[in-house]
Image: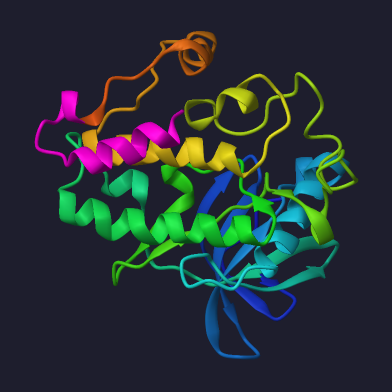
Amino acid sequence: MSLLIGQTLGHYRILRQLGAGGMGEVYEAEDMKLGRRVALKVLPEETARDSQRRERFEREAKAVAALNHPNIVTIYSVEEAAGIGFIIMELVEGETLRRVLPGGGLALGRLLDLAIPLAEAIAAAHQQGITHRDLKPENILIHRDGKVKVLDFGLAKMEGAFGDTGHGSRLPTRALTEEGRIVGTIAYMSPEQAEGKRVDPRSDVFTLGIILYEMATGERPFKGDTAVSLLSSILKDHPPPLTEIKATLPRDLARIVDRCLK
């Protein structure tokens, strides 16, 4: 369901749309009780009745609410008004990593300024038993002050108190981790994710390697003209080391990225 600018949902007034995707529409809104601007994420009407998508929506709230890290977007509440479920989140004013990536890759200093907090955010999620499963430049925001924020845990896989025990899938992931079922964004998938197999935090590490590779060179390590050829590349290809593409990059960085992509 698309909301109208100026529309009120509970005590939130919609100001503008920030983005839309398969997992919901995001708006900038004014919290009229607290007098602050927030991000409001709501499921589209056509998917609100889809139990699987609703499950993902609720899981995102649980996943992010369990995390307290300066480089992970803060969730304030999960609410419902007029029959519409929505999440209220921290509003991050800035650009996605996708929009700030130049064609030839980032300068080394800028790369490290972004990559280190990104890795720390992913590590913090993993320490809480959460595998993101859909990391990509579009889900990494760069605040105007330069701070990195990871968002969109809509495909997150949770261990322990939030879901999987490690010995089989419970309710939060059962419909999404079936053998042969692919979830996520193909260009940034790990091999086991591409094959629809069980994933764990190592899948995010692999994806981090893809993102770091692209941040450093402006190119993705795995390529294909179609979804099938791209999946084949992820499963079979061994990308050239960073230093073969950009000789000025430190060998230690190339070693780290290579290890991520093992």
Q: Nearer the viewer, residue 9 or 50?
A: 50
Q: Residue at x 51, y 10 (%)?
A: 232
Query: Which sits in the foreground, 119 or 7?
Result: 119
Q: Is residue 126 above or below residue 243?
A: below
Q: Is residue 50 visible?
A: no
**Taken as a whole, is the magenta stretch helix, strand or loop?**
helix
Q: Is residue 186 magenta?
A: no
Q: How is the image coloured?
A: rainbow
Residue at 61% across / 75% down in the picture? 13
User: How far across and how far down the image is residue 29, in percent?
Assistant: 56, 72
Mark yes or no: residue 186 visible: yes
Q: Position of residue 197 (x, y in %)?
A: 72, 25
In the shown orientation, is residue 108 left or right of residue 147?
left
Question: Quick one: which residue is furthest to the bottom in this view?
Answer: 34
Residue 176, quarter of the rendered image: top right
Q: Residue at x 32, y 35 (%)?
A: 213
Is 261 one of the magenta-colored residues? yes
Q: Seen in the image, is 202 located left or right of residue 70?
A: right
| Camera-nearest residue between 5 and 243 | 243
Q: Which residues are magenta?
A: 243-262
Image spot of residue 221 (x, y percent): 35, 24
Q: Residue at x 27, y 49 (%)?
A: 100
Whether 184 is drawn above or below 166: the answer is: above
Horizontal side of 240 relative to 73 (left or right) equals left
Give the percent coordinates (x, y) of residue 38. Answer: 55, 74
Quadrant assignment, res 237 = top left
Q: Is residue 216 left or right of residue 246?
A: right
